[in-house]
Amino acid sequence: MWGPSIVGFGSYHYKYASGHEGDSALTGFAARGRELVVYIAPGFEGRDVLLAKLGKHKTGKVCVYFRRLANVDLRILETLVAQSVADTKRRYPQPNENDA
């Protein structure tokens, strides 16, 4: 769990040029009122093309909101999440635990 209501999968450590750093889930989902939310990375290559094919949804910076799974193409959603995770892992490589 990431906070009281987000089911997160995987984790990564980030550090910005400003010095701000922390940990976050690679992806996650939550139920928010009448909508389901999937959390994906912002701005990765192909994101907008996939979102255009997804089906009935709304977006925020890192959120994809939809009311029913039946309203979206699950294959496209799976691809969105997979590409988001891959992009996040590329941008924030984690040290290999076996190297310690």
Image: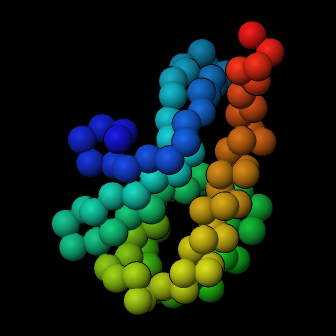
Residue at 59%, 52% in the rendered image:
41
| Residue 43 in sight from this viewpoint | no
Q: Is 30 on the left-hand or right-hand side of 97? A: left
Say if 91 sits above or below 64 in the image. above
User: Residue 38 lies in what quarter of the image?
Assistant: bottom left
Q: Position of residue 34 (x, y in %)?
A: 21, 73
User: Residue 65 lies in what quarter of the image?
Assistant: bottom left
Say if 74 sits above or below 36 in the image. below
In depth, the one of 5 and 91 nearer the eye is 5
Q: Is 15 on the left-hand or right-hand side of 60? A: right
Q: How many dots with numbers?
A: 0
Q: Where is residue 81 in the image (x, y as percent from the top left)?
A: 60, 62
| Residue 99 in sight from this viewpoint | yes
Q: Position of residue 32 (x, y in %)?
A: 25, 62
Q: Where is residue 15 in the image (x, y as percent from the top left)?
A: 62, 23
Single out the residue that lies furthest toward the left: 33
